[in-house]
Amino acid sequence: MSASTTGRATPRLLDVGLGAVLVELGDIDEVLALDARVQALVVERVPPWDTVVDVVPGARTLLVTVGTSDGAPPTGALVGIRSALLELATGGTGATMGEPVVTRQDHAAVEIEVVYDGPDLQDVAAATGLAVDEVVAAHQATPWRVAFGGFAPGFAYLVGGDPRLRVPRRARPRPTVPAGSVGLAGEFSGVYPRSSPGGWQLVGRTDAVLWDLERDPPALLAPGTVVRFVAREARGTREDRPTPGATAATVDRHAPDRCPGLEVVDPGPLTLVQDLGRPGLARLGVSGSGALDRAAHRLGNRLVGQPEDRAGLEVLLGGLVVRAVGDLTVALTGAKAPALVDGRPAPHAAPFELRDGSVLRLGALARGLRTHVCVRGGIDVDPVLGSRSTDVLSGVGPLPVGRGDRLPVGPAPATFPTVDAAVVAPAPADDSLRLLPGPRLDWLGDPDALAGPTVVWRVSPDSNRVALRLAGGPLRRAPAVEGVELPTEGLVAGAVQLPPGGEPVLFLRDHPVTGGYPVVAVVHPDDLDAAAFLRPGDEVRLRWVQPSPHRLRQGPAG
């Protein structure tokens, strides 16, 4: 950011892959002011704003994502959005970005009871120079206010607390933070609505229900809400289970006895219902989610002669066993699993009939991670927020498929399959992913250390649908930002984040919608499906698109 003649920081525009742009501003008030103007234009759907999919406020930035309903960036859309954003952000329309933001005041203050026994309470005390009792008192003494939502459904970024409590995030994020954990990070406090990864300093826990789809609105803490924390004694340990206090409402997945469907004999290690996701809900803390291997999902639906967005099953590492209820048409795509129907081999990437009472059995995968099972008519569970996908980070959507479930299949479409089989390209001999420069590439000390010709990363065992965690030699930050805390900003699928520990995190479809570590690269959208193919222990090479990485660093572009 540079200073303008008005004394206000000049906005910067930073590309985030091929389908998003990050507007860097001076403070949270400027962000919320620009957000309000952008939202008004998006509602009108006037070009170029009709291409906007998501708008995500951060502490100092506004992330604007463009695309079609399936997430593909329209040609030239980002160019028009960049120009329009720059005009808005610099007051080209006559608006003054420095105006204070008027927040909603049509809801009562919320009181949240907290047991102050967090695992980082002593570290926070040491970092602030306060005693533990003084940290607890300071957290309660000043009312907090919701600035914006993000990260996960029901998560709210609270500002306005005691400035003495400003502490950095943890050097290495925890793979799992328990639901109800109360944390601090920079100028913010927040409460984790459900179990999820996180890098905030945890000072306590609460039983408050942050997100409930049966409540209107689902989030307890709307922007502008005043929040007061009140200490209480421990009354036991909170469970993280799929109830309104932890996730979205569960979905009835049990079909009537003779409704066409699939009866689950064995779900294997993990089987999820997936479609093409629920784009456009990032403001609620809900990521796009959906099938990780989009190409495989679309192909399977085409093979059975139906629209590409119909829901199917995403099967992790094989092992699924299902029995047909009624005559069904099925296609298997994605990672090739040995498949048997009543003991006879079933084809891959070709439609086949699964007769009433027949049993389809998927064997273990020799390579790859996820097989897609598409059924003509689609898996017809009830949609949640417009999609049948399971989002494992937020808990929105159907529960994982369980033994004994009867999954209904919807009516067959009027169209018929137009191909008998598909030619599927073999998996590449070397697992490599192309990288585009991230908005914070200049935070990375040496781009070649991330994606040099001899650099090999290994997929960590704690990887999942949220992110691939890459193990290898830790990366160093650029000297100018060593120890610097990045204010929270929006994330996209494919973002490669650099935590202080130095081992990169590559976010997949179920990513948090905001984060507080620098995004130094973004996986090329055409390679994101390939990332879903990688399993723990696999080696992966990252390579920069041209030009060379040393010319990819972004300056203060307008």
Image (tube, helix red, strand yellow):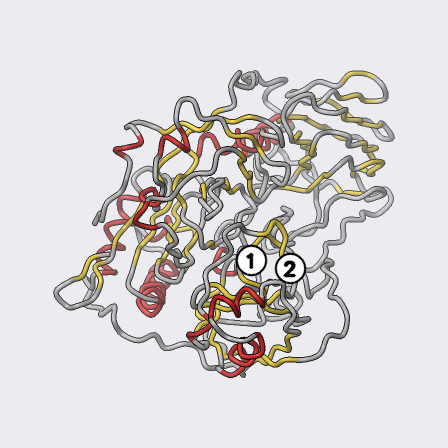
Residue 233 position (above or below residue 474): below
Mark 2–mark 1 Cα distance, whole angstroms, equals 8 Å
428 or 117: nearer the viewer: 117
Where residue 102 sits, quadrant-wise, is bottom left
Residue found 48% across the figure and 66% down from its top: 127
Measured as percent of width and height from the top left, residue 174 is found at: 59, 52
- Residue 239 picture location, percent across and down: 74, 62
Q: Residues within 10 Å of mark 2 (few under 14, many from 20)?
A: many
Left or right: 88 as drawn, with respect to 124: left
Q: Does dot 1 land on a helix, a strand or a loop?
A: loop
In the rendered view, does 99 fall on the left or right side of 153? left
What is the three-letter code of the residue carrying label 2?
Arg
- 507 or 408, which lies in front? 507
Residue 34 spot, x, y in % from top left: 31, 64
Name the residue tied to disc 1: 152
From the image, tell me which residue sits under label 2. 194
Q: Identify which residue, 97 or 92, lies in the foreground.
A: 97
Picture residue at 18% right of the left edge, 61% below the top: 3
Q: Tag 2, which secondary structure?
A: loop
Residue occupying the point 27% across, 49% down: 82
Q: Quadrant of residue 363?
A: top right
